[in-house]
Amino acid sequence: MNDQRTAVLTDTGSDCPPEFVAAHDVRIVPLRINYSDGSTYESGVDISTDEVVARFEQEVPKTSLPSPERIQDELLRAKADGYTSAVFVSISSGLSATCETVRMVARTLDDFPVLIVDTLNIGVAAGLIVMEAVRQVEAGVPLGSLERTLSIAAKNTNVFFTVRDLEFLRRGGRISETIYKLGSVLSIKPVLTCDEEGHYAIAKKARGWERALDTECKLIEGLAAKYPKVRLAVSCTSACADLYDQMEAALRERVDVPVVEVVRSEISPALLVHTGPTLVGVAVQGL
């Protein structure tokens, strides 16, 4: 427990390295994965990324936010463990109702203040904001000052991702039928991001997989130049795990400002449902 006795919680729409989560007692509230036979799983708890991929041939499941009861249970567990307040860092409110549900639950708790941080991001970019929340709490920043600090961190964090296979983005409505057809016929790959409202947006289009990956790095290069130093992140599915080294090397080569670290994290099962098994994402956090 940190000296502030402030717990840090997040959901599985935010990807943090498991070793960081374990070392800093980050509490995880899982999104749910639902199949048509009525079975429901908690993302990363009782179903893994590889298990979701293995079942894709039979069915692409749906996802849903954590129940209010599950959120409440995790907050009360933190209180019972001796924490006196909490910071909940949430997947973008533009992509999920998780953030608003946490707000609703937090209002019902007595003598346990909860700060909710809307990352306006997803995946490893949201994970960078979780990690920053931990650093700030452990540095002794009081709860009353964290909202502004973490809002700035969220504003200064951006994600870009692309996929080799566009089918899952089409099924989930993340790209239009036109973009899907162009991608299939002409091998045009959209590079997606989260806009200022936290909604998915197409940042660029590239012809071919390698150019799409290069475009991600160029976009990071441009954003990184605005800051004195940056923290970077790379996220890959197991099918693309061989690209971690390639992407980190490319980012380090392109980014001219000091790089504090490059975080690596896999994509959670709940996010994989919407992107498919060929995602490669990168993120930058200005410092």
Image (cartoon, rainbow, N blue to C red):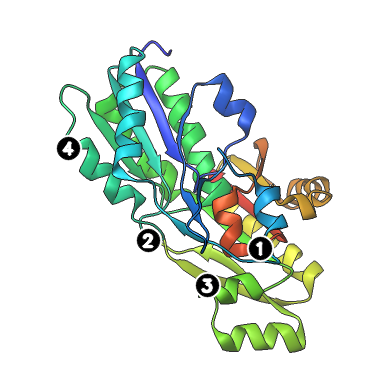
How far is disc 4 from disc 1 in space, using C-alphas? 36 Å
Q: Kindly tell me whether residue 174 is visible in this rendering.
A: yes
How far is disc 4 from disc 2 in space, using C-alphas? 21 Å
Closer to the chain start, of discs 4 and 1, is: 4
Between label 4 and label 2, give the one nearer the viewer: 4
Asked if 246 appears above or below 9 in the picture, the reply is below
Closer to the chain start, of discs 4 and 3, is: 4
Crowd around label 4: few <14 · some 14–19 · many ≥20 (10 Å): few
In-image side of 140 versus 128 (left or right): left
| Residue at 54% in and 63% down | 193
- The reply to whether discs 1 and 3 touch (Cβ–Cβ < 8 Å) is no
Q: Quadrant of the N terminus?
A: top left
Closer to the chain start, of discs 2 and 3, is: 2
The x, y position of residue 195, in whole percent, is 45, 64
* Amino acid type, label 2: Gly
In the picture of the structure, the residue carrying the numbered disc 4 is 107
Q: Which mark is residue 276?
A: 1
In-image side of 27 versus 4 (left or right): right
* Amino acid type, label 4: Arg
What element does badge 3 sit on? loop
In the picture of the structure, the residue carrying the numbered disc 2 is 94
* Amino acid type, label 3: Arg
In the picture of the structure, the residue carrying the numbered disc 3 is 174
The x, y position of residue 199, in whole percent, is 42, 65
- The reply to whether discs 1 and 2 touch (Cβ–Cβ < 8 Å) is no
